Image (cartoon, rainbow, N blue to C red):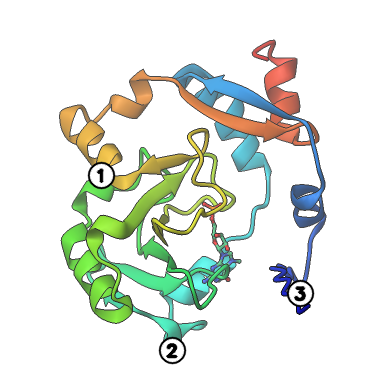
Amino acid sequence: IALLISIKTTVVYPATEKHLQKYLRQEVHLIRETWEDYKNITLPFIQSQSFSIQWVYNILEKKAEADRIIYENPDPSNGFVLVPDFKWNQNQVCLLLLPLKGSCLSEGNPEEMSTSVLIEAVTKRFGVPGSQLRIYLHYQPSYYHLHVHFTALGYDAPGSSVERAHLLADVIDNLAMDSMYYQKRALTFALRADELLLKKFQEAGRV
Ligand code: G7M
C-alpha cells in the first residue's frame, strides 16, 4: 500500500528570539485597545523597540527583490510596490503591498491606493479573480510600515483570523465615513503570554 504523506514546513533563517517565540506554543490573551491605550501603551512601546524595517526600505529603494516586483506605482506620495511575501508558496497567492509613505493605519492613506488596478495586475499575472482575493492589513503587524496582504481566498493564510486581519475595503469605507474612525473605536488583537506589549497592558491594569 502506498502511503502518501505531505508535510509542509517553514524554514526561518536567520531566526531571531522573536521568531523562536512566535513558533513555540504559548497562551494568548485578547486585548481591547482604545485610542487612549494606543497613545499611552502601544505607541510608546513601538517607539521604544528597534523593530528593523530595513528590508522594507530595501524593497522600496530597489536594493532588494527588485526582480520580484509584480506591480509598482512610483508616485512619491501615493506610490507603492507589490511583491511576493516571503511566505510565498507556488500554490498560494501571497503578496505584500508596500506604500512608499506611511507607517501606521492613522498615518497611511489606504484610501488613496487604487485597489482595482492592483487586482487587475494580480488577476493578469496569477489568474486569481478579484472575488477570490483576500486583501487585508494586520493589527498588530510584525513590521510597523504600512503594508497590505494579498492572499488567495482558498488559502487559509495564517493571520487572517478576526483578531488580526482588517479587510482593506472595510478600512477604506471606515475612513471614508470618518477620517478619525480608528481614533474613535477600540481595536481587538491577541498577544502571546511572553510578549512585552502584554506586560505593558498588564502593568497599566488593562488586562
Ligand atoms: O502584517 P505582518 O507585519 O505580520 O506581515 C509582515 C509580512 O512580511 C510577513 O508575512 C512576512 O512573511 C513578510 N516579510 C518579512 N520580511 C522580512 C520580508 C522580506 O524581506 N521580503 C518580503 N517579500 N516579505 C517579507
Dots 3, 1 in contact, CB < 8 A? no
- The answer as to whether callout 1 falls within 8 Å of ligand 1 is no
In screen coordinates, is 112 left or right of 18? left
Q: Quadrant of the C terminus?
A: top right
Residue 3: give its label.
Answer: 3
Mark 2: which amino acid? Answer: Asp
Foreground of the two, 202 or 13: 13
Q: Quadrant of the N terminus?
A: bottom right
The picture places residue 105, in percent across and down from the top left corner, at: 38, 41
Q: What residue would you read off at disc 2?
A: 67
Q: What residue would you read off at disc 1?
A: 169
Q: CA distance from mark 3 to mark 2?
A: 39 Å
In this view, the mark in front (3 or 2): 3
The disc, 3 or 1, on the residue closer to the chain's N-terminal end is 3
The disc, 3 or 2, on the residue closer to the chain's N-terminal end is 3
The picture places residue 188, in percent across and down from the top left corner, at: 51, 26
Residue 189 found in image quarter: top right
Foreground of the two, 121 or 5: 5
Q: Tell which residue pokes out farthest to the front in this image.
A: 1
Q: Residue at x 21, y 58 (%)?
A: 115
Label 1's element? helix
